[in-house]
Image (tube, grey):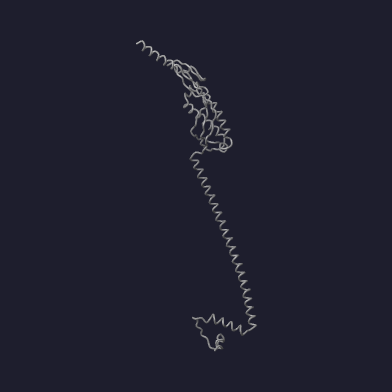
Amino acid sequence: MKQNSLIIGGVIAIFVLSSSMFTVQMTQNAVVLELQKPKEIITEPGLYFKIPFFQKVRYFSNQLLDNDSNPAEVITRDKKNLLIDNFTMFRIIDPLKFLETVRGERGARARLDDIIYSELRVEIGTHGLRDIVTGTRDTIMDKVTKEANIKAAEYGIEVVEVRIKRTDLPPEIANSIFNRMRTERERIAMEYRSEGKEEATKIRAETDKEKTILVAEAYKQEQAIRGEGDAKATKIYADAYNKDPKFYSFMRSMEAYKKSLKTDTTLLMSEDSDFLGFLNKSK
């Protein structure tokens, strides 16, 4: 019986001893609470002791944390709606103030979303769309980070950096711009087609003109060559006639007989016709 009591007492002692010890890691800070009231803040890693059952320990990360906010709509100086998707890098620098104000990381992220959105809305409202998209984005975000850090300090938070991941137009505006761009592209395409048809008509007209000129020149050359040939033939016929008129008359008559007296040809002439002169002589 005595031995059992010793065993039970040893177990209870071990349980009480283990309950009175806690470890703080290098990546953590701790707040010791006594009856839900802050008793001690521990920022150095190591093994520590607390009063079991009366004291509890809340741990908070001392590492750099990120908060990826949901896209939010803001208005620029030139009255353009933008959908801003941003993220924030922060750390807990005052665990006690952090615990008393936002209680935990979930509450801290919600509070940071409100602070960052407020600062983005104010700062972006002083810049035009072109500046936000291209030129002064870094300057804008540096100012937002500075102002957000001042407000976040009230909650034991240090805002290290605020950055924009993506900047878009709201869906309804983006669709309107897309439709306007498509209409513009269709108009330009129609202009190109119209210019192409006009150019094609000019090319066809020029080609038809060149064709007509070439055909006319060719016909002119043809007639000139034909005239020269006819003149030479006439001269040859005249020279042949002058050398032997009877033989020339005979050959011309033979050619006329060959062309006119065919198998299916019937001629009705008188016997004393000049055309049948050589036929009558042959009798």
**Left or right: where does residue 246 sit relative to residue 49?**
right
x then y, percent, for residue 55 = 45, 17
x then y, percent, for residue 27 = 50, 24
Residue sticking out furthest to the top: 2
Residue sticking out furthest to the left: 1
Q: How many numbered markers are drawn?
A: 0
**Left or right: where does residue 77 sit relative to residue 55?**
right
**Left or right: where does residue 241 sit relative to residue 14?**
right
Residue sticking out furthest to the front: 3
Q: Image quadrant of residue 18?
A: top left
Figure quadrant of the N terminus: top left
Where is 92 relative to 191, above or below?
Answer: above
x then y, percent, for residue 116 = 52, 30
Task: Name the one closer to the observer, 183 or 125.
Answer: 183
Q: Image quadrant of residue 247?
A: bottom right
Task: Name the one closer to the observer, 273 or 101.
Answer: 273
x then y, percent, for residue 44 = 52, 20
Figure quadrant of the C terminus: bottom right
Task: Name the one closer to the observer, 249 or 187.
Answer: 249
